[in-house]
Amino acid sequence: MKFQDPIPVAQIAKDYGLQIIGDDSLIALGINEIHKVEEGDITFSDVKKYFKKSLESAATIIILNERADCPASKAILLADNPFEVYNDIVSKQRPHRPLSATVDLSAYVHASAIIEPGVIIGPNVRIGKYSHIQANTVILEHTIIGDHVTIQPGCVIGSDAFYYKRGTDGHKKWRSGGRVIIEDHVEIGALNTINKGVSGDTIIGEGTKLDCQVHVGHGATIGKHCLLAAGVLIAGKANIGNNVVLYGDVGVVQAITIEDDVTVLAKTLVNKNLEKGKVYNGLPASESRQRNREIIALKNLPDFMKKFPGR
């Protein structure tokens, strides 16, 4: 998530009463979770074993709850509760605006786009040329939809990330400051749900087609010209390459990578990274040729045991 206007680190320290370690002249350009950070971003850690990862990341400003050695050209902000500071910055930069109109005044819809009855379009949404948004779809804040996109009835695009900070008093919800970006020539089937990122973007690549009742979790990226059949569930932060085919009821766990040109057969659970150009199936996923050999071997096991009694 990038800020509309850069913020001096000294200003952040003043606003929250924080001590600066390192370069106090830096400017914050955005804020992101550790796996999404870029130069100029703020990130945080409140667990000491992750300090090193945060300090060595691309982030320029790191909010910590203990002192640490600050790398050159970076700044540490010391806070009693880094998560609360991080979450408050996101909330102030992207304040929640409840829907108050069918089409928010800040939304942009190209004159050639078709918007059917019952569609709700939230704040700062952008819908491109010749796109067709069908009845009773809800498109929430900061979603960007490209040209020639079709979204079938009853979809929810840009719903909050399912992301919580566990504490002694329960689960604290993160403010979802990310976006959904749907590139050109994408088709999305009926009753899909696509969550926006916590601070980064959920991306559906150009030419990709989603069947009905697909769910895409927060911050997931789906490449170009993919096919996802009905019932596919993609967890947050998963990375799916180009020309990937996921058959019905495939489940993809969080933060894994599926490389280009992979095919995953129906009802497979993807719980590890998948290599380019291969076919996978099973629970959990394994390469289909290997899986089939294992099934044949298991089928022949009783006959094998009869040949070698007592073993």
Image (tube, rainbow, N blue to C red):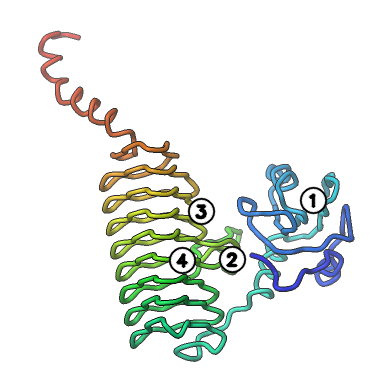
How far across and down, in percent of the image, does residue 75 sit?
A: 83, 54
For mark 1, give the secondary structure.
loop
Which label lies toward us, 1 or 2? Answer: 2
Give how far apart the Cα atoms at labels 1 and 3 are. 28 Å
Residue that mark 3 sits on: 237
Give how far apart the Cα atoms at labels 1 and 2 are. 22 Å
Horizontal side of 6 relative to 19 (left or right) equals left
**What residue sits 30% from the left and 40% below the top?**
283
**What residue sits 75% from the left and 58% below the top?**
40
Which label lies toward us, 1 or 3? Answer: 3
Frontmost residue, 76 versus 166: 76
Q: Is tag 1's residue or tag 2's residue first in the polypeptide sequence? A: 1
How far across and down, in percent of the image, does residue 128 sit?
A: 47, 75
Binning the other alpha carbons within 10 Å of mark 4 as few (below 14), some (14 to 19) or many (20 upward) gives many
Q: Is tag 2's residue or tag 3's residue first in the polypeptide sequence? A: 2
Residue that mark 4 sits on: 182
Label pair 1/2, CB-CB below 8 angstroms:
no
User: The residue under label 4 is which amino acid type?
Assistant: Ile
Q: Is tag 2's residue or tag 4's residue first in the polypeptide sequence? A: 2
Q: Is tag 1's residue or tag 3's residue first in the polypeptide sequence? A: 1
Frontmost residue, 84 versus 60: 60
Quadrant of the snapshot with the N terminus: bottom right
Residue that mark 1 sits on: 66
Give how far apart the Cα atoms at labels 2 and 3 are. 15 Å
**What residue sits 68% from the left and 45% below the top?**
50
Identify the image quadrant of residue 156.
bottom left
Which label lies toward us, 4 or 3? Answer: 4
